[in-house]
Image (spheres, rainbow, N blue to C red):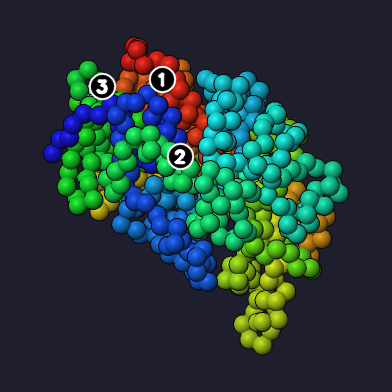
Amino acid sequence: MSEDIVDVLIVGAGASGAAVAWSLADTKMRIVCLEQGGWTNPSDYPSTGVDWENRHWGSFGIDPNQRGRETDYPINGSNSPIAVANFNAVGGSTILYAGHFPRFHPSDFRVKSLDGVADDWPIDYEILEPYYDENDRMMGVSGLEGDPAYPPKPQIMPPLPLGKSGQTLAKGFNSLGWHWWPSDTAIATEDYDGRGKCINLGGCYTGCAQGAKASSDITYWPHAIRAGVELRTHCRVREVTVDDNDFATGVTYFDENGVERHQRAEVVILACNGVGTPRLLLNSTSPRFPNGLANRSGLVGKNLMFHPYALIVGVFPDELDGYKGPGVCIWSQEFYETDESRGYLRGFTFECTRGRGVVGTALTGLGYGHIPWGSGHHAAYRKLHNRIAGMSAICEDFPEEHNTVTLDPDLKDSNGIPCPKIDYTVSENSEKMLQFAIERATEVLKASGATDILTECPIAHGGWHLMGTARMGTDPERSVVNEWGRCHDVKNMFVVDGSTFVTSAGVNPTRTIQALALYVADSMKKRLTNLFD
């Protein structure tokens, strides 16, 4: 069943799909977005109930294989030490992220020039800077001006309170003379754009029922829909169709009733994340593109980057915040830039976190052997309750072609569409960086007063950041999209999600993903008369 042609068809309603839809809406073109998930009701979030920790590992868990919602697709991650974490819904994974919201550094766009590894981006920080600013206003970012690790950037709202955990860890950094700063966070500290301010519920990872956390379903989408964008939910796209002139003609998808449909479009934009986009492209085969759409370079699905994480926490003698308050309170970028004397290239960010809830504390204590069964069980638990704080080290991941997203020959979703298979290994450079980070974090925690140190490396369910599998570049032989997101091989198809990343940096990618989406949309608007030339 074919439907009337639309001007712009967006696939995916997460962080980037929402941003590009909102930006293009002022052209008054007919814009339709297809999202395989649905709207989430904040009253259904785990954080609305006392059993929120238990429910976080159920229908609102981060692992689609464990979550098993009807809107999910399974992922074969058996050949990767890091499992993919995502969420399929309007707002995508911003529903379950912590709201930690750093920008890339200027150096992150020039890794090849500065350090002789990976590749340089075809754009730089200065090009993205106005789009960072625009995105900050739309999402509502809290932070403190003056961070010496960055170029100047405006403050939209005051920073989140440091709390006992942040203050305790900051003293440790101060004693060592190392950088720290209140983190930039997409969580409102004041009432903002119709959203209430943060009230320190502490359930950021399980969906913010207060609406303080800036998930794109409550930031960009209301504005985009009011501007005329049509958003269709429970629509799972199987393939992008093309004509004999290598132009996309639309997409074939299954609607909420499982009926196969074809939506025609003048322009197709993919915003399905760094696993979903290569999956869709590889499933879109034709005589013109037998190895997958836009894949004449052979790079679709290659150069997958995750960000290997190390978790390092300490047990403190005095009570701290526990889980109360947003997860990330301060960051340190003392070890962000390359120093070859450390034995590796590039660097990482310490994201300093508060503690865990009641169940999380118990599981941590049992897992590390700190809580025995028997008569000493409760006394041992009390020594951990509200006394854990620490940090995760988010390490830059280099693009390597052997880290891939391919199609599994057997695994299929509920509509019979082949599902992705992940092949990924942690590089030697990352291994050295992770070990260095654990050693430095241990120093900070001891300087902060921690009496015991617990570590996990890499975090097994830490595949939150999906990047690099349809990379940006000016050379069609070495990239999938050009410097403003248009596919080299299909000139009316664009990609705006993390798959376009050339390098991963040592920070969370969402703020940069959205800035890139706004930049691509603006580039399209400036070229409307010759968009396909």
Q: Tell me the element at label 2.
A: helix
Amino acid type shown at disc 3: Phe
The Cα atoms of the two marked residues, 2 and 1, are separated by 18 Å
Q: Which mark, residue 457?
A: none
Q: Residues within 10 Å of mark 2 (few under 14, many from 20)?
A: many
The image position of residue 477, as x and y in percent, is 40, 19
Question: Helix or strand or loop: what does disc 1 sit on?
Answer: helix
> Residue 525 got which mark?
1
Label at residue 220: 2
Residue 370 percent across, percent down from the top left? 67, 73
Residue, x 82% and y 52% (percent of image)? 171
Q: Mark 2 or 1 closer to N-term?
A: 2
- Dot 3, crowdedness within 10 Å: few (<14), some or many (≥20)? some
Q: Is residue 431 above or below residue 399?
A: below
> Residue at the spot x=54%, y=21% of the render?
123
Which marked residue is nearer to the observer: mark 3 or mark 2? Answer: 2
Residue in the picture at 54% in, 28% down: 131
List the residue tagged with mark 3.
247
Task: From the viewer's perspective, tell me whether residue 252 is left or right of residue 212.
Answer: left
Question: Residue 131 versus residue 113: which sits nearer the camera?
Answer: 131
x, y percentage for residue 235? 27, 45
Report the Cα–Cα distance between label 3 and label 2: 29 Å
Q: Amino acid at mark 2?
A: Tyr
Residue 152 versus residue 311 in the image, above or below: above
Please tell me in which quadrant of the rendered image residue 165 appears.
bottom right
Q: Secondary structure at mark 3?
A: loop
Extreme-bottom residue of the structure: 375
